[in-house]
Amino acid sequence: MSARRYAAAVPLGLAIAGGFGLLCFVIALISGASLALALALGLGGGVVVGAIYAARQNPERLLPLACIAGAAALFASEFMTTFQLSTTAGGICNVHALPRHYFALGVLAIFAVMAVIVAVTAASKPAAIAVGVCGVIALILFLTIDLPHANNTGTLEGCSPSTNFQFISATAQPQAGFWLEMVGALALALCGVALGTLNPEQLHAIRPGWLGGKPPDDDERRSRATRAPSLGEPEAEQTSGGDHDRPATATRRRARARGGRRG
């Protein structure tokens, strides 16, 4: 009985998120991933599924989470390899994102997360607009700095000890950091612009429950409940007024009947 009580006390959304996270963790371990990577995948999968389940009645609640996920992808891409300069014989050197962007995308990602927190907790439309601005700037940087060099072929001086003082024809092949940067920039730009279109009332509605956020349905029900008595009051007044007028009406009818008889 105690086990059943504890199981019934666990929220359904938390159980679904925990189960999916555990499944991702086990699959990652079976696939040969490291313990740290398996934990990260399990935690990330559980958080995503839990957020989707929690926002099933109000999909707009997914916008802040999508913005934070895009910012996290941008931040992580700054510490990854963007291109690999390779020849027909194989890769000769890697080009990392940090020297190319001077950590600009990381700064934008941090600022975007802070703006999301302010926009949701304070129902601030300027902060929501700032999230979209960060996403658009990150997308512009990706389109102007990294995308034009993808799969470009050129001659360069060797960048590894075995190819120093040599000029080699190499191709810039996009790596994981390039694709993660693209996904993060697109997600932050699109979701940030969508978040910036919400008004303060909608931003307040997507706040978590422990911060005072309320579903719009509750507000509508309350407004309808307050309107119902006010709409019923005139009818009650009319009914009560009719009851008071009945004796006077009957008296007038009797007086008319008597006058008719006398005439």
Image: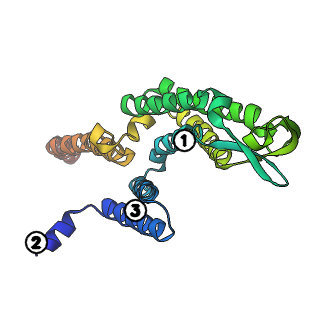
Q: Residue 24 in the image: state x and y as whole percent.
A: 44, 65
| Figure quadrant of residue 200 | top left
Q: Residue 228 in the image: state x and y as whole percent.
A: 29, 45
| Residue where numbered disc 1 is placed | 76
| Residue where numbered disc 2 is placed | 2
Task: Verify CB contact (< 8 Å) between mark 2 and mark 3.
Answer: no
Q: Residue 32 in the image: state x and y as whole percent.
A: 50, 67
Task: Verify CB contact (< 8 Å) between mark 1 and mark 3.
Answer: no
Q: Residue at 65%, 49% (x, y): give it.
A: 176
Q: What amino acid is at disc 3? A: Gly
Q: Residue at 41%, 41% (x, y): give it.
A: 206
In this rendering, position of residue 187 left or right of residue 153: left
Please identify the quadrant where the N terminus is shown. Answer: bottom left
- Please tell me whether mark 2 sits on a helix, a strand or a loop: helix
Q: Nearer the viewer, residue 152 or 73?
A: 152
| Figure quadrant of residue 48 | bottom left
